[in-house]
Amino acid sequence: MPNRIITAILWIAAAIFMQTSSADEDVNYHNIAEANSSRTGEVVIRYLRELGDSCITVQVLENISEWKVISSKYFCSIDGLSFMEDLADAHFENISIFNDKISLTLSITPLEPTGEQRLNCFIPITKKIVQEISCADQVSN
């Protein structure tokens, strides 16, 4: 009898984990320092920034079941360079959501003393999926 109870408890725990496990399971909502969202058609696009973290999480939510996260991507590198290990400083600013993309400025300072670079970037949302960040021109001062 005790083995059946333990098995039942394990099945219930697994079912609960599968229901609560989603694309946003790595986001610590207690540490959110900045967030914004915009509804675009049938979905909501939002970004989240955690306290003390220079990275950004972009998510797409759909009203399938109480606004479930259907796509999520954590951006903490650019061109293979980690914000934490390969750059002296990196942070996002001037973040705006426009229709199917997020527009932002990425400020990076390389480890070599070459000075800060400010890049115009965007993160497209294609078919309800968060795509890779794309940076083009440097911001003119």
Image (tube, grey):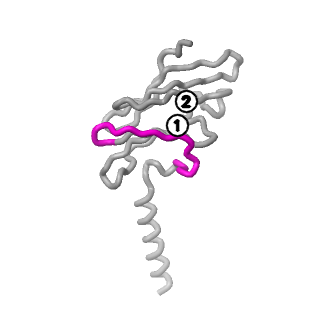
> Is 45 situated above or below 141?
below
- Give percent across and percent down for residue 24: 46, 48
Question: Which residues, given as a range, are shown in magenta?
Answer: 27-43
Q: Is residue 30 above or below residue 110?
A: below
- Disc marking residue 56: 1
Instruction: State the residue at coordinates (66%, 16%).
Output: 115
Total tally of numbered discs in the picture: 2
Question: Counting other residues with Cα less than 10 Å from the Cα at mark 1, is it few (<14), some (14-19), or many (20 or more)?
Answer: some
* Residue sitting farthest toward the top: 140
For badge 1, the amino acid type reads Ile
Checking the image for residue 5, the label placed there is: none
The quarter holding residue 8 reads bottom left
Q: Position of residue 123 (x, y in %)?
A: 43, 30
Mark 2, other Cα within 10 Å: few <14 / some 14–19 / many ≥20:
some
| Residue 66 shown left or right of residue 113 in the figure | left
Above or below, 21 relative to 34 = below
Kindly identify which numbered label has been placed on residue 92.
Answer: 2
Question: Do the residues bearing badges 1 and 2 touch, measured as CB atoms within 8 Å?
Answer: yes
The percent coordinates of residue 61 (x first, y second) are 37, 45
Q: Residue at x 47, y 71 (%)?
A: 10
Q: Is residue 38 in the magenta section?
A: yes
Mark positioned earlier in the residue sequence (1 or 2): 1
Q: Which amino acid does the dot numbered 2 rest on? A: Phe
As measured in the structure, the alpha-carbon distance from the residue carrying label 1 to the one carrying label 2 is 8 Å
Image coords of residue 129 (percent x, y): 36, 38
